[in-house]
Amino acid sequence: MKAYDLLELSGRNLREAMLRNSLTTLGIGVGVASLVAMLSLGIGLQRLLTKQLGKSSLFDSVFVTSRQDFRPRRPGADATPLTPPKPLDDAARKSFEKLPGVIEVYPSLGSVAEFRLSDGPSSEPQTGVLSGLPPSSRSSEAFDDFQGRYFSGPNAAEAILKTDFARELLGLPEIRDTDVKLTSDQAAKLLGKDLVLRYAERQSQPAPGASGQPPDAAASFNVVRKELKLKIVGIVTSEPVRGIPRTGQTSVFLPVAFAESLNMIQPGDLRTIMRQNEGKTYLALIVHMAKSGSVPAAEDEIKKQGYNAFSILDASRGLAIAFRIVDVFLGIFGSLALAVASLGIVNTLVMAILERRREIGIMKAVGASDGDVKKIFFVEAGSMGLLGGCLGVLMGWLIGRVINWGVNAYFTRQGFASQDIWYVPLWLVAFAIGFSILVSLLAGLYPASRAAKLDPVQALRHE
């Protein structure tokens, strides 16, 4: 039987029982719609999470620390000399900057300091945590809607305050919701004003062996009290996380280059004096990559150089597996409706066999083979699967749009930004239609086999 004749005959058979075949196709469409709706929800949530985390550079940064162990060796331990671990110094920083795909390398700074307004309502200093922001932090979503402006340069003596700390400087009562911005009048009392910073500076002592010191003298430093003025240029409600988040909330942000030049006391400085180091060392460095895909290669190279390296991608692998498991379960539950719809295909085609027994007998009597009869029923089943799959994809997309609109309307009333939690990629469209056709063909196996086994003599006698 020619392909044209096969398609024409199958189409005529489908048109003769229009209502029944339409209801069966609609059942397939509902099943595909449930499958598309559930999978698109899981994909949309995963995409939204990845997008939000991507804005904070969590996925494209590597956190680097030294492998130095400051613990004393136990008595009686093996005295075999070991290769000393490399210090995390300027040489290491420059080597990281030469890695492919690296945008910037900057230290992870976090120091406790005292702040007060030079002409504020209260002369009492406020204690807070100061940290540095690299130039790339300007693209953080925290600065999409903030009061004031960003730093004018990498070495500018300027500061950006967290909203909760700004309220402390103004003597305002503490509020539970830290995402509430200051009023225009409150912000005007801070923006452009001078903020007095009082901190502890680390001043290194001469190197061992210099100025009459013994060669085996340990490296040391002096702590000097310093004070300077900063210009308040911005107020931000949320912390613009770059790389690995620090412990505790930051109160004041400075340009990282300027903050580094202050040489403030860091939490690990007391441990570094236990070792003899040449030049400046860092407690931790953050290597910012241009693409998250370059992170694994950079992380491996840093480890080969003798340093500890960690990225959020290491921890997110478990999260990705969890999303895959959720997608599988959502797909299984969504497929149940399609499995039920496949029973409708079996019922429709079995009823078609009973109604067309005489027609099938005539076809076989004039030379149609069992294979030709099977092809007719397979084409009919596949056609219902194709039409039902296309209809289901459209219905699933519409369901997602309606639910997404309702969720965003609720978010807007609650003061949150609109989010796209539903996403239907092209591969999901192709998979849903292909899966619908496959299920329909499998459902047509029994009716096609039953029709092919009909005895033409008995079929012709059927009234």
Image: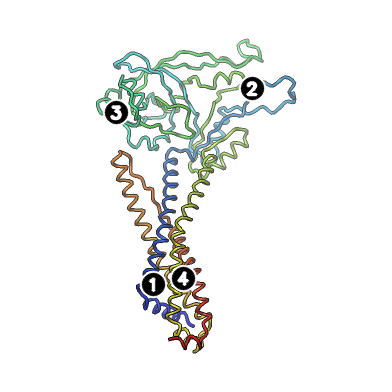
What is the three-letter code of the residue carrying label 4? Val
| N-term-proximal mark, 4 vs 2 | 2
| N-term-proximal mark, 3 vs 2 | 2
Q: Which residue is mark 1?
A: 21
Q: Which residue is mark 4?
A: 346
As drawn, which residue projects farthest toward the top? 212
| N-term-proximal mark, 1 vs 3 | 1
Task: Name the mark on residue 71.
Answer: 2
Give the residue displayed 44% in from the left and 40% down from the top: 53
What is the three-letter code of the residue carrying label 2? Arg
Mark 4 element type: helix
What is the three-letter code of the residue carrying label 1? Asn
Q: Which residue is mark 3?
A: 182
Left or right of 71: which side holds 244?
left
Left or right of 332: which side holds 67?
right
| N-term-proximal mark, 3 vs 4 | 3
As drawn, which residue projects farthest toward the left? 185
Q: From the viewer's perspective, is the residue at label 4 or at label 1 nearer?
A: 4
| N-term-proximal mark, 4 vs 1 | 1
Q: On screen, 339 above or below 49?
A: below
